[in-house]
Image: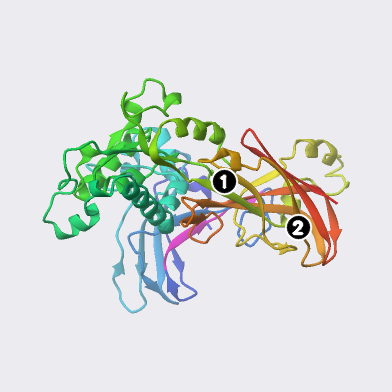
Amino acid sequence: MVELKSLATKKPDKIGIPVTKEGVLDAIVVWFELQLDDEHSLSTSPSEETCWEQAVYPVHDLADYWIKPEDQVMMEVSCQDCYLRIQSISVFSSDHEMDVGTSFTKSKDLLSLGNEAELCSALANLQTSTPDSAEQICVLESTEIALLNNVPYHEGFKMAMRKVLSSLTPEKLGQAMDTQCQNNEINCGSGQNDSEPFYVLDVSEGFSVLPIIAGALGQVKPYSSVEKDQHRITLDLISEANHFPKETLEFWLRHVEDESAVLQRPKSDKLWSIIILDVIEPSGLIQQEIMEKAAISRCLLQSGGKIFPQYVLMFGLLVESQTLVEESAVQGAERTLGFNIAPFINQFQVPIRVFLDLSSLPCIPLSQPVELLRLDLMTPYLNTSNREVKVRICKSGQVTAIPFWYHMYLDDEIMLDTSSEASHWKQAAVVLDHPFRVEMGDELVLHVQHHKSNVSITVKQ
């Protein structure tokens, strides 16, 4: 245990943690104990039921290092400038006298990140090491990192884009650039005729490598809508590292005067072959104004062009989850230290919980998943903005919430499930104001409404 007061007033303190269990050293988890007085304290430990979470410092330079009991993990801990820093992590093995591991975060290295906002961003995203100061630095959000690790997402888009481009003019498509790059015989992007390329626009939120994937499919002119300069520099570096001419990739916001008018023609006499839209937020909610964006996109597509995804199906089920109930509203009518707060606090509760992980949420499913809603970006007359869905109860219990997620169909065959383990998306849930008891075999009716990008789900008993 280290006191923050002493850390804030002195140089980094070297501490050692004895290893008690055999395994791979992946990260260091940090929590706090708030000592209110000599008798009372509050702990943010993961073993305590609190509203606090813990900080995780990944150990990159010792990746896959196996530790065992009697080993000791050494590190320098400091809290200068009000930032808790863990640096110079090393392992002293019981079998060897010398340590393994290197120093990988010095104070001056952190300061090289630039201004305070960049420093906070790096620390908030659990960055414990920094590359050489001469290299370009790109700080990504944790959701963007999760997206980059979503292999089915990128493979699905690659297959769907290839199918669309092949259906437009098959004779214009040569071999995929990734095959060309493997042979190292042809410069990627070459080998195509001089006719007009296909235009692909990616208006995904945040950092996306889909434009590079699109450009690798042949005679394609991809456009990215990334906003940050560091993201653009990184995409250029990725392109060069994969032998992809960086001049092939265009950054669309440099071509439009108003960022709110991203959806425009690539040229006065040309239309888009593919437009990629972000339909689902990482939090599990539908993106705002997505149907309006789809309506504009349909007008900008060439004949045979497609919007990705083409349509989205929303699924949900009834569950019993005391955790969701307790985290969504103040429970009971008992006073808190003499104050009656529940009736007033609960007037401002949020009816939909976001950023849920259904795979780890403590809950009891009371029904099978059912389709709640269809959002069709290519054929809007198939949309179901207001419908009633019958749900049969398969297990007796108390209905407290309705978690929901989505199946994103890039076409009729390629589907991305936002509830899968590989997904970078989280899920959301409607938490009922008044939970009620159900018995196996009961049949309920859910009223689902989609209006101005907002979804409401109510239960008809």
Tell me if mark 2 has few (under 14), some (14-19) or many (20+) residues whose alpha carbon lies within 10 angstroms of its own: many
Instruction: Check disc 2 and report its element: helix, strand or loop.
Output: strand
Q: Earlier in the sequence, mark 2 or mark 1?
A: 1
**As displayed, is residue 141 above or below residue 288?**
below
Q: Along the line of sight, which residue is nearer the eye, 185 or 332?
A: 185
The amino acid sitting under disc 2 is Val
Task: Tell me which residue sits at (15%, 48%) in the image.
Answer: 191
Instruction: Check disc 1 and report its element: helix, strand or loop.
Output: loop
Task: Tell me which residue sits at (36%, 52%) in the image.
Answer: 163
Q: Residue furthest left?
A: 185
* CB-based contact (under 8 Å), mark 2 and mark 1: no
**As displayed, is residue 199 above or below residue 430?**
above
Q: Along the line of sight, which residue is nearer the eye, 136 or 282?
A: 282
* Residue 274, position as x, y percentages in the image: 38, 40
For disc 1, the marked residue is: 283
* Quarter of the image where one finds residue 197: top left
* Residue 212, position as x, y percentages in the image: 30, 45
Whether residue 79 appears in this view of the structure is: no
**As displayed, is residue 285 above or below residue 53?**
above
The numbered dot on residue 391 is 2
Tell me if mark 1 has few (under 14), some (14-19) or many (20+) residues whose alpha carbon lies within 10 angstroms of its own: some
* Residue 157, position as x, y percentages in the image: 40, 51
Whether residue 228 appears in this view of the structure is: yes
Q: Residue furthest bottom?
A: 95
Check residue 28 for magenta coloring: yes
Query: For the magenta stretch, what is the residue range?
Result: 25-35
Q: Along the line of sight, which residue is nearer the eye, 361 or 438?
A: 438
Left or right, 18 with reference to 185 = right
The numbered dot on residue 317 is none
* Quarter of the image where one finds residue 117: top left
Query: Mostly what secondary structure, the magenta segment?
Result: strand
